[in-house]
Amino acid sequence: MFLESISTEMKLLLQTLDEFVREEILPLERPFLLHDFDTLLPATEEVRQRAKGLGLWLPQIPEAYGGMGLTLFEHGLVSERLGRTPLGHYILNCQAPDAGNMEILIEHGTPEQKERFLMPLLAGDIRSCFSMTEPENAGSNPTWLSTTATKDGDDYLVNGHKWFSTGADGAAFAIVMAVTDPAAARHQRASMIIVPVDTPGFHIVENTSVMGERGQGWASHGEIRYDDCRVPQSNRLGAEGMGFVIAQQRLGPGRIHHCMRWIGICERAFDLMCRQATLRELAPGRTLAEMGPVQNWIAESRAEIDAARLLVLQTAYKIDREGAYAARDDISLIKFHVAGVLQAVLDRAIQVHGAMGMTDETPLAFWYRHERAARIYDGPDEVHKWSVARRILSRYA
């Protein structure tokens, strides 16, 4: 049913995106994979401006804020196309964590916060980061935080230690999860607070090395220390103690974005795998495509990718119509299932490429380094399985 809801206009948009990715974005991959960021930035800015001129900007954002106004289901379709290259989402200004930060600023920001932080973010003039994960505490328990925001007059003093604050390098501000009332119920202790990076006491320790790669700019994960960062209480998003609730609102749709991006990665990896299988000769006139194990990997991957896509789009369709709470089982299912499919498809594609698969001649090694974390971030697989199984079993009790 939900596939029938794809309009003619949406199909045309997807065709335009396929062409834009192929003609404008894929040529930028080489310097990105070789970490030539200084050379890459001017070129990406030019392509971003072309995307904006074509109306391919902020697909996930309402038209009232300058976006394309797509539904979550429609943005899922777009996200798959963009996911076929590591640069896709950044070019259209819908990359994590900025996309999620835009959404919560639209929903919970004051007029002053929107003017100062949201509007430049939407325009692509600045970037942001989301600062929640702490090295000292389990990320699987988002209510367990050591970072605090203590009231001092009309201000907060923020103190704490965060890491995996994606895109902190070069960001203009961070949205920080910090405990504002340690005596409150555990889901009401923390608040989200905007901390500009030029605030005294804001220190980026380093870009965290991920399997040997530190990255740069938006394609990095920052370790941050907050040492008596003084910000006005007016920088708080929403009511005090609403941090966990806002985070949950952010993560539900965000998992659709991630999962459809992963499917885009799978499709690109699948295409590379099939091309390599038909071209790579083991002996004169004998290719990898003739090998039984390779044929099995191709068949299994095709079935797994197609099934995963249908599961994610079904979930997005349900969220659009019934809300994230009604789709909470579906959200957990897609999070761990698609992450597993992603890892399996990437592993097969690398195996078919042999030694080349371990290099940066293709994006496979980049994805293998960074997307192994798909089974960890936004809730590890084990937590999602435990959570959805408990809800299912409760219906039988």
Image: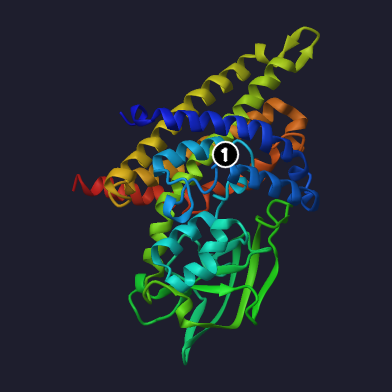
Indicate the amino acid at tag 1.
Answer: Leu
Q: Quadrant of the N terminus?
A: top left
Tell me residue 18's x, y (percent).
58, 30
Residues 47 and 291: in front is 47
SS class, disc 1: helix
Examine the rendering and report whether any part of residue 192 can be seen: no
42 horizontally vs 192: left or right: right
Residue situated furthest top in the rendering:
285
Tell me residue 105's x, y (percent).
45, 64
Q: Residue at x 50, y 69 (%)?
A: 115
Mark 1 — residue? 82
Q: How is the image coloured?
A: rainbow
Q: Residue at x 43, y 71 (%)?
A: 111
Q: Relative to 350, does residue 239 appear above or below in the rendering?
A: below
Q: Residue at x 35, y 52 (%)?
A: 387
Tell me residue 371's x, y (percent).
60, 45
Residue situated furthest bottom in the rendering:
153
